[in-house]
Image (tube, rainbow, N blue to C red):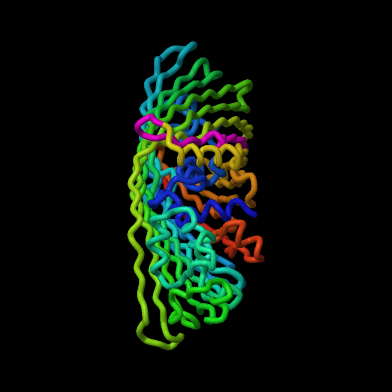
Amino acid sequence: MNLKYIILSAFISSIFWGKAQAQSIDESVIFSKDDNPGSARIKGMGNIQTSIGGDISTINGNPAGLGFYSRSDVSATFNLTGNKFKTDYLGTNNSSNKTNFGIDQAGAVFSFPTYKRSGWLNFNMGISYNKTQNYNNNLVYEGNNNNSSIVNTLTDLMANNSTFRDDFSKSGIVELYENPDDGYYPLVKENESKNQYNEVITRGNKNKTALSFGSNYNDKIFVGASIGITSFQYEKGTRFIENGWTKSLAEIEENTVDVTNPNYADKSYELFDNFRQVTSGTGVDFKLGAIFKPTKDWNLGVTVTTPTWLTIQDDTRAYTDVDMYEDATSPKPINSYESKFYDGQLDYNLTTPWKFSVGATKFFERGMISADVEYVTYNTTRYSSSDGFPSSSLTAVNNDIKNNLQGVFNFRVGGEYLFTNILSGRAGFNYFGNPYKQASETNYNGSLGLGVKLTNSIYADLAVVYQMNKYSEAPYTMSPFWLDQGLTNPVANIKNERTTGILTIGARF
């Protein structure tokens, strides 16, 4: 079974704990990822940052690049993002779109030369605001399922939690087996067509304020360090809807002697499974960087980024409603069930991965080409309780992270060519590694950019970045008990295309 199908169903399986919880493998990846924010110039060159100096992006990239500045610099970067999802769910194609505008980056570098001819030539400082993740997405898919039902998953949950079992047994969509010790089974007809609709809406951003220092030694060695303060707000709402028919009375009696709800046989039903999550967090990280110039036309760079130590607060709510109808055309339900609200509220800590990056840049008479390799240790991500005491649920997730995530290599390459002393062109490519051991995922982007020197001190940069991400998920997953009976977890194949236009306006003084 594809692991990704399991981890993206956490909003349903959360009821195992008696209340809704958001902590999962997938959440650890979402909150750990950073989009390595950069100016339009750097984005146009494929977001290469490790061995490049003299750009505002070095504040949050490789702080050693601050040592290349001989003048102060101030700039702001804006973006317009179009986000499109294309899905194939059980043979039915769907699409959804979301467009948003925002500020990607704003910052300033202050240059303090020492006026020496050798030794330490400057001590520069930079401060910037950076948007490191954009969580604004609308994902919708639907199709007809004739092999399983979400009710199969809900009966699994009943077997593991007495509170939910006592509650959902009143829904009319489940019955006790002939042997009560075997628990409950679905009244739905798994092997007949059911329309299923899943909507996942996420909102929010992850931001970082970075304070960096960099210095230049003899135009040969550049060193730097930074401290980053991260904050994020993440909101997620999911709604799964299923429409189908219940089994006949004869089919129900095959499994039980005493039918509790005979009036619900051969009836049309509509089920709503809902989840709401609001998560916020703050944290701190540190970065060290160095750039070495073995010759005038080469830069070699390295950065080490510590984990971000995040303090997080979760507020969640999960509930399920079921309406029973005499037939598919009945205007009013013969029975309506509303489950209890399963609320969760928890403060906890998250330690994100380490990051290590090396890069090289080759300069030519009219341009340059640069490449980065970054290693991210996703399998070292860890949850911990805010009070310092071990939590069995968080320990279980940490074990899953260790066993099912892996370190990844991200590759970036890009270049710049000076058409004139005023106009330059750029291009780049990124490949992102897959953090899941047992799940396939494709993630890459390509970029193009232009730079214009408006005056001796004012400049403008433009870039367009196209990113493509392919993966698969399941709206719910079932226990091996159901899989052994020939049922299968439904799978949505998803293609996410994100096109971003980026503009940077800056001035040097």
Q: How many marks?
A: 0
Q: Residue at x 36, y 71 (%)?
A: 337
Report if residue 373 lies within the magenta region.
yes
Q: Position of residue 444 (x, y in %)?
A: 60, 50
In front here: 491 or 171? 171
Q: Residue at x 36, y 40 (%)?
A: 312
Report if residue 112 lies within the magenta region.
no
Tell me: residue 383, above or below residue 136.
above
Name the side, left or right, on which 270 lies relative to 250.
Answer: left
For the record, the magenta segment spans: 367-389
Name the side, left or right, on which 279 lies relative to 369.
Answer: left
Tell me: residue 164, above or below residue 388.
below
In front here: 489 or 392? 392
Q: Position of residue 298 (x, y in %)?
A: 62, 27
Residue 415 shows in this picture: no
Q: Residue at x 44, y 58 (%)?
A: 137
Quadrant of the image containing the C terminus? top left
In front here: 100 or 64? 100
In front here: 371 or 469? 469
Name the side, left or right, on which 334 lies relative to 152.
Answer: left
Q: Main secondary structure of the magenta part?
A: strand
Q: Position of residue 154 (x, y in %)?
A: 48, 62
Name the side, left or right, on which 499 lies relative to 131.
Answer: right
Quadrant of the image containing the N terminus? bottom right
Q: Position of residue 149 (x, y in %)?
A: 54, 68
